[in-house]
Amino acid sequence: MTAESADKHSELFMGLVVSFQVSALQYLGKLVSPHTGKSERNLEAAASSIDMLDMLAQKTRGNLQPEEERFLKEIISHLKLNYVEETSRPPAPGLSEQNPSGSGSVGSESG
């Protein structure tokens, strides 16, 4: 693989990780949905996005550049902390709630 190809793959990988991060943050009600213009909380969908990143970390272990691995681990850790914070409090006034039970899996740290 050429250096240029490796750089492109690294950018694409990080873009994929960020897309799951943004989805999770939207589902946690931390970001406004571009579709509705409102903050909405769907803890099951947030857990699914976080679990996808956990799976990605496990499946790519040993195949990532150090900065890619660090980037992925930091995002997963940040999202898990936000998930725990959101599951321990009621939704904010005016925040639309979907699936309030928070029954997603969001396992332990991958590492």
Image (tube, rainbow, N blue to C red):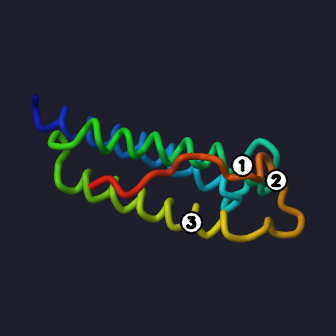
Question: The disc labelled 3 sits on which kind of residue?
Answer: Asn
- Residue at image point 61% right, 70% down: 85
Residue 45 percent across, percent down from the top left = 64, 43
Q: Is residue 67 visible?
A: yes
To which quarter of the image does residue 111 belong? bottom left
Residue 44 percent across, percent down from the top left = 65, 45
Question: The disc labelled 2 sits on which kind of residue?
Answer: Glu
The reply to whether the C-beta atoms of the residues labelled 2 and 1 are less than 8 Å apart is: yes
Q: Give the total number of marks visible in the rendering.
A: 3
Residue 42 image label: 1
Question: The disc labelled 1 sits on which kind of residue?
Answer: Asn
Mark 3: which secondary structure? Answer: helix
Residue 82 image label: 3
- Residue at image point 10% right, 31% down: 2
* Quarter of the N terminus within the rendering: top left
- Residue at image point 81% right, 69% down: 92
Residue 77 percent across, percent down from the top left = 41, 62
Residue 105 percent across, percent down from the top left = 54, 47
> Which of 61 and 34 lies nearest the eye of the viewer?
61
- In the displayed structure image, the side of residue 46 where residue 61 appears, left or right: left
Q: Residues within 10 Å of mark 2 (few under 14, many from 20)?
A: some
> Which of 60 and 67 lies nearest the eye of the viewer?
60
The single residue placed furthest to the right in the displayed view is: 94
- In the displayed structure image, the side of residue 28 where residue 38 appears, left or right: right
> Which of 110 and 67 lies nearest the eye of the viewer?
110
Mark 2: which secondary structure? Answer: strand
Q: Is residue 8 visible?
A: no
Which one is earlier in the sequence, the residue at label 2 or at label 1? 1
Residue 97 image label: 2
- In the displayed structure image, the side of residue 75 where residue 58 appears, left or right: left
